[in-house]
Image (cartoon, grey):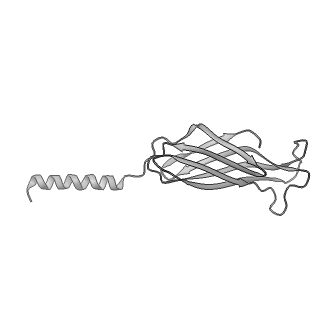
Amino acid sequence: MHPFRRALTAIALAATLTLAAAPAWAGSPHFVDDKVTLTRSGDALTASGKVAGLGDETQITVTVTADVQCVNPGNNEPQAENKGATVAEGTAPVSNGKAVFSVTGTGVVDPSAPCPGPQTLAYSDVVVTVSGDSFDPDLVFRSDSTF
């Protein structure tokens, strides 16, 4: 083999191996407009939003946690063991470095019984966490509103 051809083959092989071994790359993951929308319907809480800057990521995982508790009609929190934490988790596909997500769940304060009447379920300190294989740290959105 001619020395010049051998050198070109070696360069091409090195470039191929470098590209094949490159990790998935996220550009600059962020919530679009720095916003996540939180809505409530009945006892269910929904977190929805859009994440961009995900680069080659193929899927994101969205986790919603909150302080979940029963409150009485005067919006007081009884001193009882009626609190919960994780509300929902789901995944969303990434297309062209962007993902649109909507995750809905219902908090549980006591798996054996709902809030005793006339108390209702309330969510506070809601945290939406978005994670992916190619970025660290996770994206985190916090709301101090009560739903």
Check the image and name the residue furthest to the bottom: 112
Quarter of the image with the C terminus is top right
Q: Which residue is drawn at 91% across and 54% down?
A: 117
Q: Residue at x 50, y 47 (%)?
A: 135
Check the image and name the residue furthest to the front: 41
Return the x and y of residue 99 as percentages of the image width and height.
53, 48
Residue 111 is drawn in which quadrant? bottom right
Residue 127 is drawn in which quadrant? top right
Return the x and y of residue 100 as percentages of the image width and height.
56, 47
**104 is higher (above) or lower (below) than 36:** below
Q: Residue at x 73, y 38 (%)?
A: 144
Return the x and y of residue 53 as percentages of the image width and height.
48, 42
Return the x and y of residue 140 as percentages of the image width and height.
61, 43
Instruction: Tell me if 51 is positioned left or right of 143 in this view.
Output: left
Check the image and name the residue furthest to the top: 33
Instruction: Tell me if 7 is positioned left or right of 142 in this view.
Output: left
Front position in the image: 8 or 54: 54
Instruction: Tell me if 96 is positioned left or right of 100 in this view.
Output: left
Quarter of the image with the N terminus is bottom left
Q: Which residue is drawn at 48% across and 40% down?
A: 28
Instruction: Tell me if 68 is positioned left or right of 55 in this view.
Output: right
Report the number of discs. Answer: 0
